[in-house]
Image: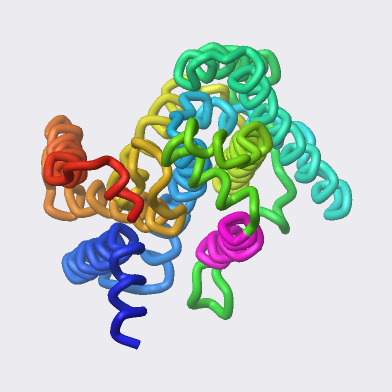
Amino acid sequence: MSGGIHYWLRENKGTVLAFVAFVAMFALYAANHPAGLNANVATTAANKGTILAIVAMAQTLVVLTSGIDLSAGMVMVLANCLASHIVVGSLPSALLGALGVLAVGALCGAVNALIVIFGRLQPIVTTIATGSIFYGVALALRPVPGGDVNAALADALTGQIAGVIPSSLLLLLGLVVVVWWPFRRSVVGRAVYAVGSSEMAAYMSGVPIRRAKFVAYTLSGLLASVAGLFVTFVTYSGEASAANGGTYTLYSIAAVVLGGVSLFGGSGSAIGAIFGALMFRTIGDLLFVFNVEPLWQPLFQGVVLTAAVCLGSLRLLRIRNRLELYG
């Protein structure tokens, strides 16, 4: 029994550390917030954190294959602009529009996958190019901010359950249960970890490398579009903001690192990335609560991120054989 717990802690060390750090930071934030911890404060924090957490989940799927998706934020922006056009009208019509947005997001991810797999281009180069295309489409849809969204659907997902629990947290839990856990336990999910650990070894072992990459990138695009939908529900509008797209892309990479996911691929969990995202958002909230000058806030966030990256790199310096990372 103790051996099983030891193995589980070793395998999920990054997730556990991210969870503990987030709980400690949020407790400090709640204790020092002028209004204290109430349902409205928790809901506001949860809604902000959920957007980044979903994009971080999307980023994790690609990072596990030993790639980085620099188009994730732009897929989110595209989904936001598209949703402000078609997730409107009656509830059935809005739900159909939401499915259309998700389909477009999955298509964006599939395009990335096909270029990486058959074009044999580096994921960073590929997603920089496709991200520009996705942003161009978003800008064509929304040259200026505007649009609308079904109010009942938006309020249901950004409000509170029983006046206490933020609905956005249930959305996150639903994504973990419906998307991450089935993926992680599937043959394709295990293949993604194998590809990220060593693509050559995975190929020699008969692992379906192309299928693994295709599923990972497609699901990444799907999750990024969920984040874009949620942005629309929060703002009731669409905006083709390159700044937002770039910021969420970079912050998602930060959340992945803080959540214990290895940028070398093959190690980590989307659950850890979620807590990394919530922790990263809480850092910003703490700086606000303690009245740190806005011009200094990026500096402190950068210091925290740099420290996290350095701590993750220390493990590589200690090992003699890279295979020990996956033992």
Q: How is the image coloured?
A: rainbow
Magenta range: 167-185
Determine whether 11 is above or below 316 in the image: below
Query: Which picture quadrant has residue 321?
Result: top left
Question: Is residue 192 depicted above or below 84 in this figure?
Answer: below
Residue 177 forms part of the magenta stretch: yes
Residue under the point 57% across and 29% down? 77
Q: Position of residue 78 (x, y in %)?
A: 63, 27
The quadrant of the rendering that contains the C terminus is: bottom left
Q: Is residue 313 magenta?
A: no
Picture quarter with the N terminus: bottom left
Q: Is residue 290 left or right of residue 157?
A: left
In front: 68, or 253? 68
What residue is drawn where x is 47% and y is 53%?
50
In the picture, measured across the screen, residue 20 lies left or right of residue 54, that is left
Nearest the eye: 8 or 248: 8
Give the farthest residue toward the bottom: 1
Residue 313 location (% of width, % of height): 18, 40
Residue 292 visible in the shown view: yes
Give the prevailing secondary structure in the magenta stretch. Answer: helix
Residue 307 placement: quadrant: top left
Look at 44% across and 29% down and name the residue there: 68
